Image (tube, grey):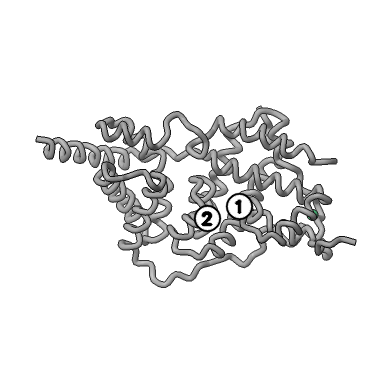
């Protein structure tokens, strides 16, 4: 067995993944173009922008406030603030960063969260049971790109990934959503969630490891590629 | 004799996430790359992690509940009305 073709496989995979892509890849219409259309009074453009970000906005808000309803209120206030501020938005930061900053600020003000104890989740993200006493793999992992190359992949895998993220405990879920789903930088994520960068990295590592594990189970468990 | 201190597979996988984010120190990165060069299993793990991250980036937004959309449409209509009023 050799995996030296990994880089090649990975490029192929990225091409494949871009068929499901949202905004981490070039997409139908980028944010800036939507903003221009919104300023021109285009309602459809606003709907598109809302649909793009609402889920993540509510998730970030939920990180600070006590229930889902308050989180939705924060998201709605965020959109009001966005529309009001749109003409003054200078595009010096990306729209995405600006949007999430507004949401985090509003959620912080609304939030009743007291001194939060960050749960870094001390359990080993890759089960120790997978390694022997010398720290070597007992059962060797197989590259996912082998599966993905085997047949054209399927929205089902992406769905499994979404579900795995949804099942992550907080604050891992918010960290993975902002970093990997929305593509913000680790530094931006740490500011939005009031975490140190070091803690953000630990949470990201653990969250990613869990999503990876879920996908491994999915891909191994007799997944049929048609 | 290896100049780089050897790490185990268990230690290597703990570095993968930071490695992909370019967040390792030079020394850690060298140790990990040295390990990966000789370890198919951890290279496979690295591949799995890359795919996991790429898949997360392709998760599309969930459909919004009807209520949320209606509320937000109202927000937009108000915004338009206010702008038009200002314009008059
Ligand atoms: Zn190894």
How packed mark 2 is, by other alpha carbons closer than 10 Å (few <14, some 14-19, many 20 or more), is many
Residue A149 at x, y = what percent? Answer: 71, 31
**Regarding mark 2 in the picture, which secondary structure is present there?**
helix
Image position of B74 with respect to A111: above or below: above
Identity of the residue drawn at 68% across and 58% down: B15
Query: What mark, if any, has residue A186 been given in the picture?
Result: 2
**Regarding mark 1 in the picture, which secondary structure is present there?**
loop
Both marks 1 and 2 on one chain: no
Q: Quadrant of the C terminus of chain B?
A: top left
Furthest-right residue in this view: B1
Choose top left, top right, bottom left or bottom right for residue B1: bottom right
Contact between marks 1 and 2 (CB within 8 A): the answer is: yes
Left or right, residue B88 beside residue A136: left
Name the residue carrying label 1: B21
Choose top left, top right, bottom left or bottom right for residue A221: top right
Identity of the residue drawn at 48% across and 64% down: A195
């Amino acid at each position: 067995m050799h995996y030296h073709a990994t880089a090649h496989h990975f490029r192929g995979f990225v091409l494949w993944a871009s068929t499901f892509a949202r905004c981490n890849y070039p997409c139908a219409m980028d944010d800036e173009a939507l903003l221009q259309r919104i300023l021109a009074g285009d309602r459809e453009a606003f709907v598109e922008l809302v649909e793009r970000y609402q889920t993540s906005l509510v998730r970030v808000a939920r990180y600070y406030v006590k229930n889902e309803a308050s989180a939705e209120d924060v998201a709605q206030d965020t959109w009001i603030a966005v529309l009001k501020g749109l003409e003054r938005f200078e595009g010096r930061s990306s729209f995405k960063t600006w949007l999430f900053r507004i949401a985090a600020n509003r959620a912080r003000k609304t939030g009743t969260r007291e001194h939060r104890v960050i749960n870094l989740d001390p359990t080993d993200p890759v089960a120790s049971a997978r390694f022997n006493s010398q720290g070597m793999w007992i059962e060797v992992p197989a590259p996912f790109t082998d599966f993905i190359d085997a047949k054209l992949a399927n929205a089902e895998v992406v769905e499994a990934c979404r579900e795995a993220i949804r099942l992550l405990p907080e604050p891992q879920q918010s960290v993975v959503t902002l970093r990997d789903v929305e593509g913000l930088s680790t530094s931006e994520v740490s500011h939005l969630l009031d975490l140190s960068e070091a803690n953000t990295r630990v949470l990201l590592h653990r969250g990613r490891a869990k999503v990876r594990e879920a996908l491994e189970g999915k891909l191994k468990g007799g997944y049929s590629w048609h | 004799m290896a100049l780089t201190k050897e790490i185990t597979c268990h230690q290597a996988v703990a570095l993968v996430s930071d490695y992909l984010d370019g967040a390792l120190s030079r020394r850690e990165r060298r140790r990990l790359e040295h390990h990966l060069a000789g370890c198919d299993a951890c290279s496979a793990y690295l591949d799995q992690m890359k795919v996991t991250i790429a898949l997360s980036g392709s998760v599309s937004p969930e459909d919004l509940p009807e209520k949320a959309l209606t509320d937000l449409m109202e927000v937009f209509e108000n915004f338009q009305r206010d702008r038009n009023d200002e314009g008059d």
